[in-house]
Amino acid sequence: MSSVDYRQLGQDHVDAVLEVGIETYRIFDAQTSLQVLIKLIDPNTRQVIGRVSGKTYSVEDSPQTLLQP
């Protein structure tokens, strides 16, 4: 993963940067699993303010069911 300088985003005032990533996913037959990682970063200090991850699993026909609340 490469280093990003959040101060160079071209915005006048940015309170925080939200990074969203997919760590793992699997689609097989009618089974789907997904793990999403989210980080909130202070753009001036590059410190992580908060982070959370979530996993979901579905045996329904559509992968879109994983993204529903």
Image (cartoon, rainbow, N blue to C red):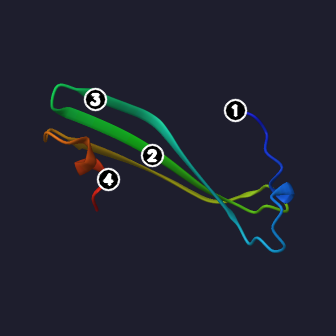
Amino acid found under the numbered disc labelled 3: Ile
Image: 42 above or below 36: below
Q: Indicate the position of residue 33 as horizontal and vertical percent values.
A: 29, 37
Residue 36, disc: 2
Foreground disc of the pair 3, 2: 3
State which mark lies toward you, 1 or 4: 4
Sequence-wise, the earlier of marks 4 and 3 is 3
Quick one: label 1, few (<14), some, or many (20+) residues within 10 Å?
few
Earlier along the polypeptide chain: callout 2 or callout 4?
2
Give the class, few, some or many, for how many residues have Cα within 10 Å of label 3's Cα (few <14, many ≥20). Answer: few
Q: Earlier in the sequence, mark 3 or mark 1?
A: 1
Q: Give the residue displayed 19% in from the left and 32% down from the top.
A: 31
Q: Give, as a three-letter code, the residue at label 4.
A: Leu
Residue for badge 1: 1
Going from the N terminus, do you reach mark 2 or mark 1 first? 1
Q: Give percent across and percent down for residue 30.
A: 15, 32
Report, in whole angstroms, how far the alpha carbon at label 2 lies from the one at label 1: 16 Å
Query: Which label's residue is closer to the chain start, 3 or 2?
Result: 3
Residue kind at label 2, given as amino acid type: Val
Numbered circle sitting on residue 27: 3
Residue lying at 79% horizontally and 61% vertically, measured from the top left: 43
Please report the residue visible at 75 percent of the width from the left and 63 percent of the height from the top.
Answer: 42
Q: Are marks 3 and 2 in contact (CB under 8 Å)?
A: no
Q: What's the residue type where badge 1 is placed? A: Met
- For the residues labelled 4 and 3, the Cα–Cα distance comes to 14 Å
Residue lying furthest front in this view? 10
Numbered badge on residue 67: 4
* Quadrant in which the C terminus appears: bottom left
Label 2 environment density (alpha carbons within 10 Å; few <14, some 14–19, many ≥20)? some
